[in-house]
Image (cartoon, helix red, strand yellow):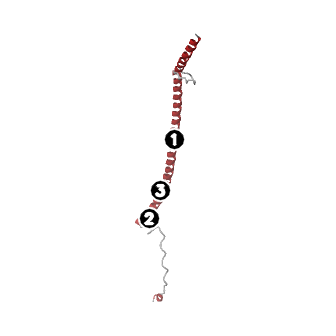
Amino acid sequence: MTQKRLADLLFEEPQKTTEVAAEPVPTSPRKRLPTKADLEATITELQLALAQREEQLQTLDGVREQQVQHASISNLQAQLEQVQKEALQLAQANTRLTLELTALKKENEMLKSGGPKSIRPPLPLPPAMPADPIWLL
């Protein structure tokens, strides 16, 4: 009977190993799947990070816009200064022309009224001739 039992044990042993092989043997710890709460927390964190990045982007856009506006203002100020210089030069030239026009009008009125022929100093007279008529011969 012991032989029969021994034979039975030998027969049952391969069947047990097959059953054991059919069951998954945990060789490494399994990763646990995230729960709904874990996923919702991750979504919330990502949304906050996205909002912060968008705020940073808006801030950078604002800074860039200010830099562009500053450059534009500087350019406009330089143009304004140039136009002011040109306007000053034109005003000075206009003043000189106005003074010259006024002087010419005065000279014209004096000529019309029969006053001195010119405001300009008269030309020098030629040297006087000697009174001796012999000199003329």
Residue nearer the viewer, 96 or 21: 21
> Residue 26 placed where, x, y %?
56, 22
Q: Secondary structure at mark 2?
A: helix
> Residue 106 placed where, x, y %?
44, 62
* Sequence-wise first label, 1 or 2: 1
Residue nearer the viewer, 124 or 60: 60
Instruction: State how far apart marks 3 and 1 are (Cα).
Output: 39 Å
Contact (Cβ within 8 Å) of mark 3 with mark 1 = no
In the rendering, which numbered label is found on residue 90? 3
In the rendering, which numbered label is found on residue 114? none
**Residue at point 52% right, 24% down?**
39
- Reading the image, the residue beneath label 1 is 64
Quick one: quadrant of the C terminus?
bottom left
Contact (Cβ within 8 Å) of mark 2 with mark 3 = no
Classify mark 2: residues with Cα within 10 Å, few (<14), some (14-19) or many (20+). some
Which amino acid type corresponds to the residue marked 3 in the rendered image?
Answer: Leu
- Of the two numbered discs 2 and 3 in the rendering, the one whose residue sits closer to the viewer: 3
Which amino acid type corresponds to the residue marked 1 in the rendered image?
Answer: Arg
Q: Secondary structure at mark 3?
A: helix
Quick one: quadrant of the N terminus?
top right
**Residue at point 47% right, 56% down?**
90
- Of the two numbered discs 3 and 1 in the rendering, the one whose residue sits closer to the viewer: 1
Classify mark 3: residues with Cα within 10 Å, few (<14), some (14-19) or many (20+). few
> Residue 4 placed where, x, y %?
56, 12
Instruction: State how far apart marks 2 and 3 are (Cα).
Output: 26 Å
Classify mark 1: residues with Cα within 10 Å, few (<14), some (14-19) or many (20+). few
In the rendering, which numbered label is found on residue 107? 2
Residue nearer the viewer, 119 or 74: 74
Which amino acid type corresponds to the residue marked 2 in the rendered image?
Answer: Glu
